[in-house]
Amino acid sequence: MRRIISVLLENEAGALSRVIGLFAQRSYNIETLTVAPTDDATLSRLTLTTSASDSQVEQITKQLNKLIEVVKLVDLTEGEHVERELMLVKVKATGAQRAEIKRTADIFRGQIVDVTSSAYTIQLAGTSEKLDAFLRALADAIVLEVVRSGVSGMSRGEKILSV
Amino acid sequence: MLSGGDILIRCLQEENVDHVFGYPGGTVLHIYDALFKQNRLKHVLVRHEQAATHMADGYARSTGRPGVVLVTSGPGATNAITGIATAYMDSIPMVVISGQVQSHLIGSDSFQETDMVGISRPIVKHSFLVKSAKDIPETIKKAFFIATSGRPGPVVVDIPKDITNPTDLVEYEYPEQLTMRSYSPATKGHTGQIKKAVSMLLEAERPVIYAGGGVILGEASSELIELVQMLGYPVTNTLMGLGGYPGTDPQNLGMLGMHGTYEANMAMHHCDVLLAVGARFDDRVTNTVAKFCPHAEIIHIDIDPASISKNVVVDVPIVGPVKTVLNDMVSILRDKSKKDEARPSEHIAEWLDQIQGWRNVDCLSVTPHENGQTIMPQQVVQAVYKVTGGSSFVTSDVGQHQMFAAQYYPFDEPRKWINSGGLGTMGFGLPAAMGVQTAFPDEVVTCITGEGSIQMNIQELSTCAQYGLPVKIININNGTLGMVKQWQDMQYEGRYSQSYMESLPDFVALVESYGHVGFKVQTLDELEPVLKEAYAIKNKLVFLDILVDPHEHVYPMHIAPNGSMRDMWLKKGVRT
């Protein structure tokens, strides 16, 4: 089952490698990973998605909590949550295709952030499923390059992850 | 104002370190110079860095205080890795200080550079790369705190050479307090869970207490004894837990697991309530996990939440130091017995009878060799037990001799039995014994080893000579890698692929060349008299090269794969 684990990590050299190393060492998989400092510069927020059973995710969170630099963590998929992923797609855009691609981007509330005579770069944010759907909708166009940020997320409502 | 090198030494003194085990080299020369200028801290110079880590490990296991290691960068650091991994697997508190190349050279593949923090990452509790001399005090304070608190473990502190430069002076102050927002080990178990556990234990009809190395690491032996004796229930120790409950006490079923006793494994399999104390349900204990304790409700006390329900799902988890949790259980029991709610152990009389029946199988009986003179390896351990009165520190290497030592030398006290349980490191025994002897110069320290293992760190005979460490080395010599051979006998139709040693040294001549005493023992008649003679030599290392029957196997032995704990070979060709 897909899980989103969000971690508050000391913003120190080597902290990230311990998290990644733990996953490799214990044969857990990482599907997406995103990490950046928070408003508190001493802390980074790391969000990763993995697929794991209930007992596996229990081990994963316990093992992560054992890392000295992990301050707090939450399995967002345990409750209501908001998740977003950012994607940039560069597509070949010539002739009649230019208008068609623009229309598809509009439907998905994507924005064209860079234009040349033969290519568009489209920015799209949403759940991973929405990004997948957009790529499927572009089926007729020639996709030149795709970059995705990986998932970020937060719990809904009053619940927060902070020190 | 002090240099980084002097600061480091001061910090170690602040942590009451009395011995450092190490080996100098380019990047730690400033530190070694600072060491030279003081007398409080003693340094033990080994012959290989692996031995330094095992010595520190033996020191830590026998004293309960953290072992300290000092090695240089590159090969010094990588040589230490096996010892760090050994300590990590058995949760031994250790602080390893490694030199690193100068800060500006890091990442340039410079001479003797290796990414120690990276290489050691999967086998440490934590590690630090020190960035400036003024960071040394806080880093060292944290390193010792992390290594010794919660579930203990090794911590690496990697220090670039420029940071210890004698000409760069900074203010020195050792911090009194530490604040670490991301690290706070449990200090107490959950009261509700503890009460529930006690009620379950009192209701049990076929209870067993399964006590591991956590009892020893957590200094909880007397609490365990009190609880077990109040309940009157049977107890079994893991390989790491031997000595946590007295080995000669009638309530002790002996060791459990792959080479555990018949009665311990049968009791585990048939129990209805299992109390696991500081044990981690290792695969060498459980045999096939799906068949583990099929009738039992399981209570598990452990300081490490990640140990709970890792291999075996438990019913009542209690996260906390075993010592305080056991104490809480004892006081609840006491209250209950005042109110007459505690049932005396008579209600388990039937269970105890059943266990007695298993005991009567006498699974550890030793059959002497038919010629009457060839020594059986078990007889060696029995004779060592007799001659030392069961009071020696015993370290072991890894293999058949390790299992024989665990089976035939009952330990009545914690911290007397020292072996590499988790990693199974051959070459551990001799340096570990040296670490114990360093901590306890006047005590009897025995290293039970084999001709395979001893050669993995035999260079340390030289260190023993330098520091006058009078370790007694019992080399159970069967001329083969016995445990490998046993498996080849049992699973590979006797194809002895690479399990013979065909060019053994003359061990007696070898140890004598270092100035030690050596004896060769070949017959049963000689065994006890020579052991007595060896142990009478108090101030010298004595090496006993004891030739034994090369065909003997270790029994009982779990039947794997797919066996449960009750499935065992009891003798060659005899199974449950």
Image (cartoon, coloured by chain):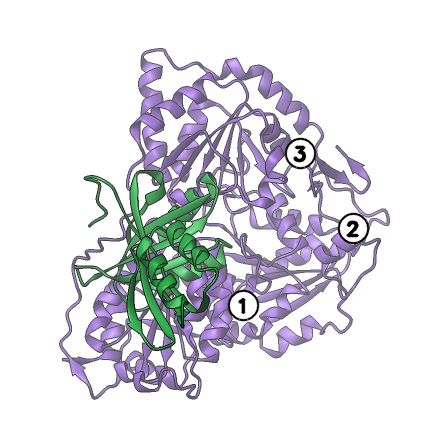
Sequence-first tag of 1 and 2? 2
**Is the Cβ of the residue at disc 1 closer than 8 Å to that at disc 2?**
no
Asked whether residue B155 appears in the rendered view, the answer is no
Considering depth in this image, is B300 or B395 the residue closer to the camera? B300
Residue ID for mark 3: B262
Q: Secondary structure at mark 3?
A: helix
- Name the outermost residue toward the right: B371
Of badges 1 and 2, the one in the foreground is: 2
Residue ID for mark 1: B540
Considering depth in this image, is B526 or B86 the residue closer to the camera? B86
Question: Is B503 placed above or below B527 here?
Answer: below
Indicate the chain coloured green by its letter. A
Using residue B249 as the reference point, say whether residue B106 is left or right of it.
Answer: left
Residue found at x 28% / y 75%: B39
Residue ID for mark 2: B491
Percent coordinates x, y for residue B216 in the rendering: 43, 45
**The residue marked by circle 2 belongs to what chain?**
B
Q: How many residues crowd around disc 3 within 10 Å: few (fewer than 14), some, or many (20 or more)?
A: many
Sequence-first tag of 1 and 3? 3
Residue found at x 49% / y 58%: A25
Q: Hey, what amino acid is under mark 1?
A: Lys
Q: Hey, what amino acid is under mark 2?
A: Gln
Percent coordinates x, y for residue B99 in the rendering: 37, 78
Sequence-first tag of 3 and 2? 3
Using residue B414 as the reference point, say whether residue B34 is left or right of it.
Answer: left
Q: Are marks 1 and 2 on the same chain?
A: yes
